[in-house]
Image (cartoon, helix red, strand yellow):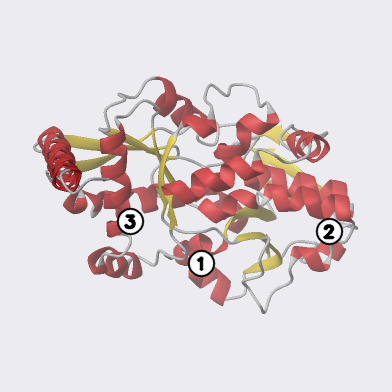
């Protein structure tokens, strides 16, 4: 290379840097212009006072400060089908401009894997923004029930309240019935908030699924008074060291593999999604704002004040990567887990 070429290359590189910088600044300005004075809506797939609703409202109070243009952020509840309705809406109907996000059931990400009826989305095509916390699943029972341990539940029937057919609170007891021979009889149709009240009224015996820490936050007095007991922690990684763990009971490899897949979505316990087709620069802004909000002292103090646990927030790109791995699960395991999403014999729905 001649010496005369060196200044030309340097000049070209400098020009390219200037062009890239100007382009980046223009995109940033465009994102700011889009969000300035706008209202961003977070659609949550459950009713008021459910844990997903509480986390969505927590995020809504803080993420706007970290978005370019500092838009107003509101929450819209859209319950139905354990957040199936909201998931389909976000994917197919919501504007694809970054003005609408969704907080959906964590397990919804894997539903397309199982071929569930009513699924109208490709989980890998969502824009995953992040997750506020991981979930610690637990199978809990009222202290006056005939059985308060898994061993006893193989001898005595327990009424397990659930929300929708395919939520964890229905899937977990079906899996336990199959793997351990427990005698849970599932009654569907409760709301998340109404399920504990149903236990207090003795309509149901158990709430086998859902987040332990959300339950502790909303009904800690019942736990402290010994009225709600843990039959088993339902997680891949043990957290509740002083409570029974499901893998102390389930030992067969085929059962272990199935449970590992069932519990997978606890990693992204409170997921936030944007529709497919949102411009890349706005997805980047949303992810950056989410990550910043999760480190914001104001959000963390707010969460502490209302007893919401922030444990292991997950970045959007990390959720995307995990999903791609789980979608490679062997077919026989997928088929078995998929079957747990179907109603079993003797299940019924409450009359409203």
Residue 2 drawn at (x, y percent): 22, 45
Among numbered discs 1 and 2, the one appearing first in the sequence: 2
Residue beneath disc 3: 291
Image quarter hosting the N terminus: top left
Query: What residue is at 21 percent from the left and 43 percent from the top?
Result: 73
Residue beneath disc 2: 153
Q: Identify the disc placed on residue 90.
A: none
Residue beneath disc 1: 216
Q: In this view, does 13 lie to the left or right of 351?
A: left
Report which quarter residue 74 is drawn in. top left
Image quarter hosting the C terminus: top right
Seen from the viewer's position, the closer of residues 147 and 149 is: 149
Which one is in front in this view, the residue at disc 2 or the one at disc 3? 3
Query: Please, what secondary structure does the residue beneath circle 2 have?
Result: helix
Q: How many labels does the image show?
A: 3
Distance from Cα at disc 1 to Cα at disc 3: 26 Å
* Residue occupying the far bottom of the picture: 242
Residue 258 drawn at (x, y percent): 78, 48
Dots 1, 2 in contact, CB < 8 A: no
Q: In this view, does 70 lie to the left or right of 214?
A: left
Q: Is residue 292 above or below residue 242?
A: above
């Amino acid at each position: 290379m001649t010496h005369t070429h060196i200044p030309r290359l340097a000049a070209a590189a400098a020009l390219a840097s200037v062009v890239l910088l100007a382009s980046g600044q223009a995109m940033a300005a465009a994102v700011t212009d889009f969000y300035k004075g706008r209202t961003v809506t977070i659609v949550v797939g459950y009713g008021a006072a459910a844990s997903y609703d509480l986390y969505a409202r927590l995020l809504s109070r803080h993420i706007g400060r970290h978005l370019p243009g500092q838009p107003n952020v509101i929450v819209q509840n859209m319950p139905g089908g354990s957040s199936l309705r909201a998931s389909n809406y976000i994917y197919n109907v919501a504007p694809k401009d970054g003005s609408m996000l969704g907080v959906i059931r964590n397990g919804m990400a894997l539903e397309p894997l199982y071929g569930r009826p009513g699924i109208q989305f490709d989980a890998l095509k969502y824009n995953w923004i992040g997750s506020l916390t991981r979930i610690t699943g637990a199978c809990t029972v009222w202290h006056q029930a005939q059985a308060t341990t898994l061993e006893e539940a193989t001898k005595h029937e327990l009424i397990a309240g659930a929300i929708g057919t395919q939520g964890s609170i229905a899937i977990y007891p079906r899996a336990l019935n199959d793997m351990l021979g427990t005698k849970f009889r599932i009654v569907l149709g409760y709301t998340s908030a109404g399920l504990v009240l149903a236990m207090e009224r003795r309509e149901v015996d158990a709430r086998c699924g859902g987040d332990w820490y959300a339950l502790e936050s909303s009904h800690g007095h019942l736990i402290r008074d010994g009225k709600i007991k843990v039959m088993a922690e339902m997680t891949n990684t043990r957290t509740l060291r002083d409570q029974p763990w499901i893998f102390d009971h389930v030992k067969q490899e085929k059962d272990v593999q199935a449970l590992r897949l069932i519990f997978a979505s606890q990693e992204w316990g409170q997921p936030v999604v944007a529709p497919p087709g949102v411009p890349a620069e706005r997805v980047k802004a949303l992810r950056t704002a989410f990550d910043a909000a999760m480190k914001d002292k104001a959000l963390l103090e707010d969460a502490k004040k209302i007893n919401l646990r922030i444990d292991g927030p997950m970045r959007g790109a990390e959720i995307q990567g995990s999903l791609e791995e789980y979608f490679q699960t062997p077919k026989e395991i997928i088929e078995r887990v998929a079957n747990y999403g179907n109603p079993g014999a003797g299940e019924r729905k409450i009359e409203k």
